[in-house]
Amino acid sequence: MLRRWKIRILLFLAVLGPGFITANVDNDAGGILTYSQAGAQFGYALLWTMIPITIALLVVQEMCARMGAVTGKGLSDLIREEFGLRVTFFLMALLVVVNFGNVMAEFAGIAGSLQLFHVSKYLSVPVCAVLVWLLVVKGDYKGVEKVFLAASVFYIAYIITGVLAQPSWREAMVATIRPPGRAMWSARSYVYVTVGVIGTTISPWMQFYLQSSVVEKGVTAKTYGASRLDVIVGSFFTNIVAWFIVVACAATLFAHGMGAVKEAADAAEAMRPLAGRYAFLLFAVGLFNASLFAASILPLSTAYTVCEGLGLESGVDRSFKDAPGFYWLYSLLIAGGAAAVALMPNARLVHMVILSQVLNGVLLPFVIVFLLLLINRKDLMGEYANPGWLNAIAWATSAVIIALSVFMMFAGGY
């Protein structure tokens, strides 16, 4: 019995990575600022979204990981093969535009977090851009993955920050299981931030990156059981962290009437007098870690996705010579994102960051529909095709996001 459990644990550790890393990049600068905005602007009123979003995240990511393990191909690769190059190119173009906004969000987080320690963004942004570029271009898959796994551990800082903020635990728990009244939904900003919370938690790029990572790691249908556990652990952990970020900002910024976050570092700076110096430090260090972490993953995900979709060589284990398109796209996204943040006024960065997460939410249903059309094909998935209950959750997720997006567009913006 003990030997069997040892084998299971070793097998889980062997495949640990893609699911845990991908889910945790959810809590990047865009995620942290969106969750902070949710707590600062609406208190605990958005906590109820965490349960359905966690379920949806589990379902969508499990489907991507399973399809990667069974087919041995990335999602964009399969979309090109099954739906043609024209459809794939259109989807890739949309993804590049949305992901460029996400990359800008990461460098905005780097700039904001280090400005708290009096480091100018004109120094921090270019230096960090070079560091993340070197990490991937000069590393291999196993080495890069170890760095990303280590970075994931630092998200515990937000759980500690939430505790130090001394929230009303009873009020937070009640809000987690009880949606707000109808009056709240009439507020356009509430719907806007709700779409942003969904988009930052189940980002479209994550699905492409996860499936590509599962393939590159060599996970197969036989070893998929442990990989599924990796996805489940990552999804729960990332949303627990998200819950504590909302709670921390609700207990400090909202409770003291400070309202919406205006600059990237506002949430951390405001915690210094309200929740103590340690909460401030943990939030600031966590924001920097998350931003640097995701500034590596997001351009990498985009490069993987586009190159797979267009049939080009990709992968961090290939050289620059073997995969020039992959490395050039990765490099251009980093350079462009860093330059845009360095040139943009600080006051506009938070609006841009949250808009990028809302666009994630608007694009997500398209990705889920392609995913569902592929994973239900018996000729592609065989016995691993989707069961009906997973289809129901995924279709419901798409329908809800589309309805919210339509309402938001007709009702007005943020």
Image (tube, rainbow, N blue to C red):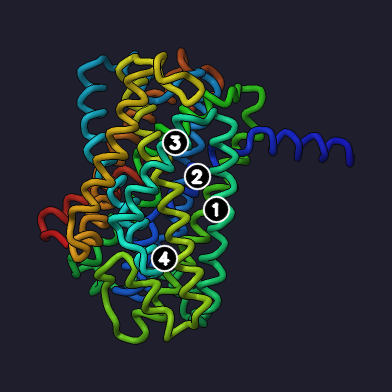
* CB within 8 Å, label 1 to label 2: yes
Measured Cα–Cα span from mark 4 to mark 2 = 17 Å
Residue denoted by label 2 = 58
When asked about the image quadrant of residue 250, the answer is: bottom left
Q: In this rendering, is residue 50 above or below 210? A: below
284 vs 391, nearest the viewer: 284
Mark 2 neighbour density, 10 Å: few (under 14) some (14–19) many (20 or more): many
**Foreground mark, 2 or 3?**
3
Q: Nearer the viewer, mark 4 or mark 1?
A: 1
Count every numbered label the image shows and give the total: 4
Left or right of 405 in this view: 410: left
Q: Is residue 221 left or right of residue 370?
A: right
The location of residue 305, given as percent across then percent down, is: 36, 27
Q: Which mark is residue 48?
A: 4
Spatial separation of the CA atoms under disc 4 and disc 1: 15 Å
For label 4, the SS is: helix
Pointer 4 or 1: first along the chain: 4
Label 2 and label 3: CA atoms lie apart by 32 Å
Q: CA distance from mark 3 to mark 1?
A: 31 Å
Earlier along the polypeptide chain: callout 4 or callout 2?
4
Identified by mark 1, the residue type is: Phe
Helix, strand or loop under label 1: helix
Q: Which mark is residue 134?
A: 3
CA gap, disc 1 and disc 2: 8 Å
Provide residue 258's location: percent of width, then percent of height.
Answer: 29, 82
| Residue count near mark 4 (Cα–Cα under 10 Å), binned few <14, some 14–19, many ≥20 | some
Amino acid marked by disc 4: Trp
